[in-house]
Image (cartoon, helix red, strand yellow):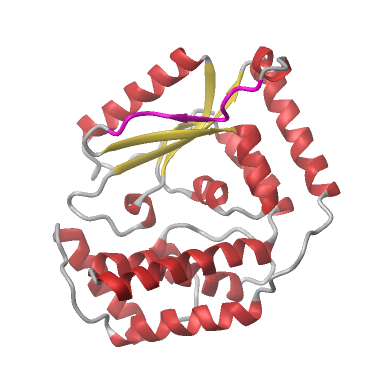
Amino acid sequence: MFLRTVPDSMDPAVVAAVDAELDRVAAEHRVCIRLAIESGSRAWGFPSPDSDYDCRFVYVASLETYLSPWRTRDVIETPLVGLLDVNGWDLAKALRLLVQGNAVIVEWLMSPIVYRGDEAFRTRLREVAAEVADRDRVARHYLHLGERQWRLFERNGGLKKVFYALRPAMALRWLREHPGAAVAPMHLPTLLSQCELPADFVDAVTELTALKSRTREMGTGAVPAPIAAFIATEFHTAADTFASRGPRDLTAARAITDEFFRTEALAVG
């Protein structure tokens, strides 16, 4: 079933440009785009009036490409044009990174904004991700990302940057409150709604998000105290909760992803 969920708040001209670029990529590179989503602040739930359009996609190349001994690049990158940023990964690359604990493909699968895709493909890949994603490694991914962004904020200021630490902190909180899951929502309002949180913290996030939505330049300033305390606490707690472990046995994960990849590659031909 064809999948498309693009909110009316997005500029129709830019969305049309995304669609045209995806058509061009598919034809020029001879690939089948299985899922194309928005991955930036619009999908995270805290856009600014001038936020970029960050389209990311997963594609399957021709069987001829996979059977050739001559390796080709497993990413497709297009030039930045205005607010438009369109890039994608080969399904094989996405699966390898998923097994290694990279949370990027997990986030793509959870994006609430879909430019195009096959609903059955996304459903199956979500199931694969739930089976093979390493919960601790995904959490460590968010911890390192969040700490890096928080250091950048502390060094350079700029209230916009608070959100890039806040979202990983919320993902870590969500994972702690959902101990059986390895795949967290990417959408900040969804993370907030699915966790037990102090009212003053939720109010502070809501106010800061509203400010960002109507302001091109938020400038510098003090972070609301409930948000600063939350971020610090979640990063400290996550460092103790989610273990940093050595290599794990990937036999089962590789078998699951092998089967999924072969099925998709043969289907595209």
Along the line of sight, the residue nearer the viewer: 40 or 207: 40
Quarter of the picture containing the N terminus is: top right
Q: Residue at x 27, y 27 (%)?
A: 16
Q: Position of residue 85 (x, y in %)?
A: 33, 37
Q: Residue at x 27, y 45 (%)?
A: 52
**First to last magenta residue range:** 71-80
Does residue 193 appear in the picture of this structure?
Answer: no
Eyeballing the image, is 192 above or below 10? below
Along the line of sight, the residue nearer the viewer: 252 or 154: 154
Residue 38 figure quarter: top left
- Locate residue 18 relative to residue 91 in the image: left or right: left
How many circles with numbers are drawn on the protein?
Answer: 0
Q: Position of residue 109 (x, y in %)?
A: 54, 46
- Locate residue 180 relative to residue 177 in the image: left or right: right
- Locate residue 181 relative to residue 145 in the image: left or right: right
Q: Position of residue 87 (x, y in %)?
A: 43, 34
Q: Residue at x 34, y 66 (%)?
A: 163
Q: Residue at x 53, y 83 (%)?
A: 236
Residue 216 counted in the magenta span: no
